[in-house]
Image: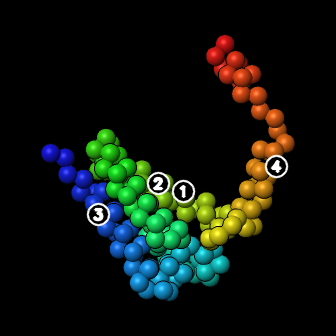
Amino acid sequence: MFKPYTTAVVLVITAVPSLLQFAIPGLEPALMRDPAAIGGGEWWRLGTALVVQDSGLLGTLFNLVCLAVLGYFAERTFGPARWLTLYAAGAVAGEAAGYLLGRVDGPPRGRAAEWHHRGMDLERNVPFDVQAYEARVTS
């Protein structure tokens, strides 16, 4: 029988601080990604931001359940080493994007807000004909 040890370890490493942040009020702000603090030398926040959640208790539980379920299937499909590599690559890419876009929490700000609003403008102002697109793709 398959035993997802890597998923279990990643889940515990993520779950402990994620759940402790609800019992220790200052834990999330002390660990979350904060570009100003990172720029001030608190580089460790790039890693600790992975283990705190800013979406409340239900969001945290949802994220942990998804990590457990998807981690199980990913580890079973790819093996522990490849799964961990994919997880780490996604974590690094996500943290780098969050840092570069200046996103801490809440609504988009800085460059992230600019990109968000440009996307909304494109969505409103660019007509998209699904039937014409499907006709081009299938022909």
Q: Is residue 47 visible?
A: no
Q: Amino acid at mark 4?
A: Asp
> Sequence order check: which comes first, mark 3 or mark 2?
3
Camera-side mark, 4 or 1: 4
Query: Of label 1 and label 3, which has the lower sequence position?
Result: 3
Residue at 50% across, 71% down: 56
Is there CB contact under 8 Å for labels 1 and 3?
A: no
- The residue where tag 3 is placed is 9
Estimate how packed mark 1 is, as few (under 14), some (14 to 19) or many (20 or more) residues with alpha carbons within 10 Å: few
Residue 1 point in image, percent of width and height? 15, 45
Please report the residue visible at 60 percent of the width from the left and 75 percent of the height from the top. 34
Residue 32 in sight in this render = yes
Q: Is residue 38 left or right of residue 116?
A: left
Q: Indicate which disc, 3 or 4, sits on the residue closer to the N terminus.
A: 3
Q: Seen in the image, is 97 located left or right of residue 59?
A: right
SS for callout 1: helix
Residue 27 in the image: x percent, y percent? 47, 83
- In space, the residues marked 4 and 2 are separated at their CA atoms by 31 Å
Q: How far separated are the C-alphas under marks 3 and 2?
A: 17 Å
Mark 2: give few (<14), some (14-19) or many (20+) Cα within 10 Å: few
The residue singled out by tag 1 in the image is: 93
Q: What residue is disc 2 on?
A: 89
The disc labelled 1 sits on which kind of residue? Ala
At a point 38% along the width and 68% down the height, the residue shown is: 14
In the picture, measured across the screen, residue 60 lies left or right of residue 9, that is right
| In the depicted structure, whether residue 116 falls above or below residue 23 | above
* Residue that numbered label 4 is attached to: 121
Q: Measure how far apart labels 1 and 3 are at the Cα level.
A: 21 Å
User: Which numbered disc, 4 or 2, marks the residue closer to the eye?
Assistant: 4
**C-alpha distance separating marks 4 and 1:** 26 Å
Tell me the quarter of the picture where residue 35 sits. bottom right
Question: Would you place residue 71 above or below residue 45 in this image?
Answer: above
